[in-house]
Amino acid sequence: MPQKNTHGQRKPRQPKYRLSPDTMLIALRGASKLSIDEVAEITAPITAAFIQLRRAQATMLDWSVLAGSITLALRIEAQGVVRGLDEHLQSAAAALQKVHDRAMLSGQWRTTCLYAAELEAIDTGVDLHRYQLEQLSQSELIRAIESAEGDVRSNRGVVVNRQQLEVGVDA
């Protein structure tokens, strides 16, 4: 039964969600493309990880950064925002899987050299991911990240975000 106030009238309906004072600003922010600085900030750790992998000095974290970026690139491709890159991104994912398999042969991560084809596939994947990011809006990126996180979790992987790495929290 609806609650009544002291004058016998129904209480006004309370909205479920807090209303924003500037809904248009929020919509515009979500629709705007990522800035050059934002793309650079996102791709900096990816580029650093690729350099380490290319030098045969990569840690498992470096590999994970690259694998996560390719997973995200595949989700962006699946969204349909930037199309036609699937074959190249799948090649990069397969190359990263081969690197992982070789590095984990002993049961612990050991750095490994890359074959030329693997190096080329991963380099192309990283470049295409950067191109994708330049085409995305903020809301499209957020949707792709959430989808990629779901993919990782459904494959029994662990999702670690950058803040956890900076603070040193175990995932």
Image (spheres, rainbow, N blue to C red):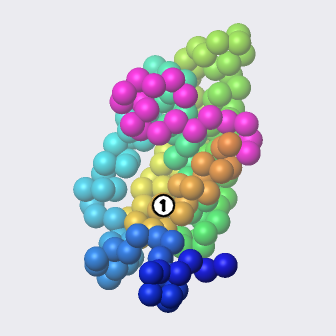
Is residue 67 rendered magenta in the image? no
Report the residue at 57% width, 55% height from top. 146
Would you name the residue on which mark 1 appears?
Answer: 142
Report the residue at 47% width, 39% height from top. 161
- Left or right, 60 with respect to 86, comes to left
Say above or below: 44 vs 111. below
Check disc 1 and report its element: helix, strand or loop: helix
Quadrant of the image for the C terminus? top right
Q: Nearer the viewer, residue 84 or 27?
A: 27
Q: Main secondary structure of the magenta part?
A: loop
Callout 1: 10 Å neighbours few (<14), some, many (20+)? few
User: Is residue 52 visible in this depiction of the protein?
Assistant: no
Say above or below: 99 vs 137. above
Magenta segment boundaries in residue numbering: 154-171
Task: Where is residue 20? Give x, y as percent.
Answer: 34, 74
Task: Where is residue 87? Give x, y as percent.
Answer: 66, 59
Badge 1 amino acid? Ile
Report the residue at 74% width, 41% height from top. 155
Q: Nearer the viewer, residue 141 or 127?
A: 141
| Quadrant assignment, res 152 | top right
Q: Nearer the viewer, residue 103 or 13?
A: 13
Task: Where is residue 9? Give x, y as percent.
Answer: 50, 89
| Quadrant assignment, res 122 | top right
Say above or below: 64 vs 148. above
| Quadrant assignment, res 21 | bottom left
Say above or below: 40 vs 35. above
